[in-house]
Image: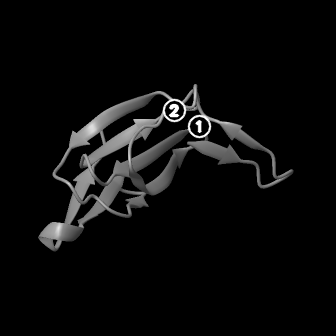
Amino acid sequence: MLEVSLKDKTIRQLGNGEPIGNLDGIELLDDSTYLVTEFMGGGLYRVDASGAAKLVLDLDQSTADIGYVPASRTVLIPMLRKNKLLAFRLQ
C-alpha cells in the first residue's frame, strides 16, 4: 500500500512494501488505520500506519469495494459473486 499526502503530493510506502493481497476496497478508519478488502482471498483487513495487516474477517472470494459508516462503526462489504451485501459492526 502507498500513502499520498494531499498537501504536498508526496508518496510513501506503508510498511516494508510487501503486498497484502489483491486489494479492492479501502476506507480510512481513523488518522492512521485503514480497512481494506482482499478480492481473491476474501477478507477484511485492518492496516495500520506501519503497514501491518491484521485479518478482521475471513470471508469468501469476491469481497469488493467497501463502505464504512463511522457513526455506527458499520462496515459494508459487497460480495460480487454471491450477489450479497454484508454488514458488520466493528468492536
| Residue at image location 49% in from the left, 44% down from the top | 34
Q: Which residue matches tag 2? A: 48
User: Do the numbered discs 1 and 2 sit on residues whose CB atoms are within 8 Å?
Assistant: yes
* Secondary element type, mark 1: loop
* Secondary element type, mark 2: loop
Looking at the rendered structure, the number of numbered marks drawn on it comes to: 2
Residue 81: mark in rendering: none
Q: Quadrant of the C terminus?
A: top left
In the rendered image, which quarter is residue 58 located in? top left
Which numbered disc flags the more N-terminal residue, 1 or 2? Answer: 1
| Residue at image location 16% in from the left, 74% down from the top | 83
Sort mark 1 into few (<14), some (14-19) or many (20+) by Cα contacts within 10 Å.
few
Q: CA distance from mark 1 to mark 2?
A: 6 Å
Q: Is residue 16 left or right of residue 67?
A: right
Closer to us: 81 or 34? 81
Residue 70 visible at all: no
Spot occupied by residue 84 in the image (x, y as percentages of width and height): 16, 70
Closer to us: 70 or 84? 84
Q: Is residue 75 left or right of residue 85?
A: right
| As drawn, 62 above or below 37 | below
Residue 32 visible at all: yes
Spot occupied by residue 72 in the image (x, y as percentages of width and height): 35, 56
| Residue at image location 33% in from the left, 62% down from the top | 64
Residue type at the position of mark 1: Ser
Sort mark 2 into few (<14), some (14-19) or many (20+) by Cα contacts within 10 Å.
some
| Residue at image location 51% in from the left, 32% down from the top | 48
Residue that protrudes farthest toward the right in the picture? 8
Closer to us: 23 or 49? 23
Residue type at the position of mark 2: Asp
Spot occupied by residue 14 in the image (x, y as percentages of width and height): 60, 34
Q: Which residue matches tag 1? A: 32
Closer to us: 53 or 67? 53
